[in-house]
Image (cartoon, rainbow, N blue to C red):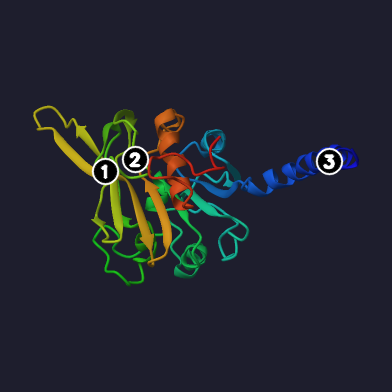
Amino acid sequence: MQKKSLLRVARPIIFLGVLVSSPALFAAETPKPIKALLITGGCCHDYAQQKDILKKGIEARANVTVDIIYSPDGNTKPALPIYGNPDYAKGYDVIIHDECAADINDPAVIQGVLKPHQDGIPGVNLHCAMHCYRFGEFTKPVAVGAANSHWYEYLGIQSSGHGPQEPIAISFTDKTNAVSTGLGDWTTIREEHYNNVQVFPTAHALAHGIQVINNKAGEPQRTNDFVVAWENIYQGKTRVFSTTIGHNNETVSDTRYLDLVTRGVLWACDKIDADGKPKAGYAK
């Protein structure tokens, strides 16, 4: 009789111990959100609206918190506080470049922008980020290692311009990649289609865009076919995702665009599975 009484007393104590420890175990297994820094502002785009569209869209799709550095300057030399501060990315897991700073051309300033990525912090680059930090004969293919090649080597593709705004038919040419698997092809509204001066060997194309340009009466149409989304491994270690799409607010707010960008963020941070789904703890 005495042994049975002891057992009856012991069981509730063990059970309570499990209840007390479970919340602590659960908290330990829940990963912290990815900390992303969105840098935006400059010429030619409605960044005042697009910064909020991107933040809301990314945070709704994945366990990511997006902080914003924004300059309202509507010129090609926006006064972004990252310039001259090579430690601007401290504390962040990924940097999203969405600035339009075509005339920021001081090599020392550009080096400061690149420093975090050279140290291994992943990058995501949207639209006009491809036309930033350029100087010299940037309309011609730059040589790897040249003074004016550094930003392009980080991106993985060199682009120098675009034609008139016309719809772009986007097709995913690698449908098995973690970023692109399950994403459907689509045709944008009238958009800017960025050219490819050259694609570096470190880059891997995910999607192409075909745009038909209607010339003046009597002149034949022309068709441009360029890479519009890709991955790059910078300096052999840093993951970098880029897309040239995203000029107009309607495109930036398109569910398909936000899905693509969010997957790019997850891939850059190595938080996406092969099936295109966020790794455990990073889904919303």
- Residue 16, horizontal then vertical, whole percent: 81, 40
Where is residue 176, by image quadrant?
A: top left
Q: In terms of image quadrants, where is residue 152?
A: bottom left
Which quarter of the figure has residue 44? top left
In percent of the image, x 32 and y 45: which residue is there?
Answer: 177
The residue labelled by disc 1 is 174
User: Left or right: where does residue 219 sit relative to residue 257?
Assistant: left
Inspect this view and state whether residue 75 appears: yes
Residue type at numbered disc 2: Ser
Q: Which label sits on residue 180? A: 2
Confirm or deny contact between disc 2 and disc 1 (CB under 8 A): yes
Residue 127, percent across and down?
A: 39, 44
Up the image or down, 185 lies above or below 102; here it is above
Left-right relation of 5 to 102: right
Q: Amino acid at mark 3?
A: Leu
Q: On screen, 252 above or below 98?
A: above
Please tell me which of labels 1 and 3 falls first in the chain. 3
* Residue that numbered label 3 is attached to: 7
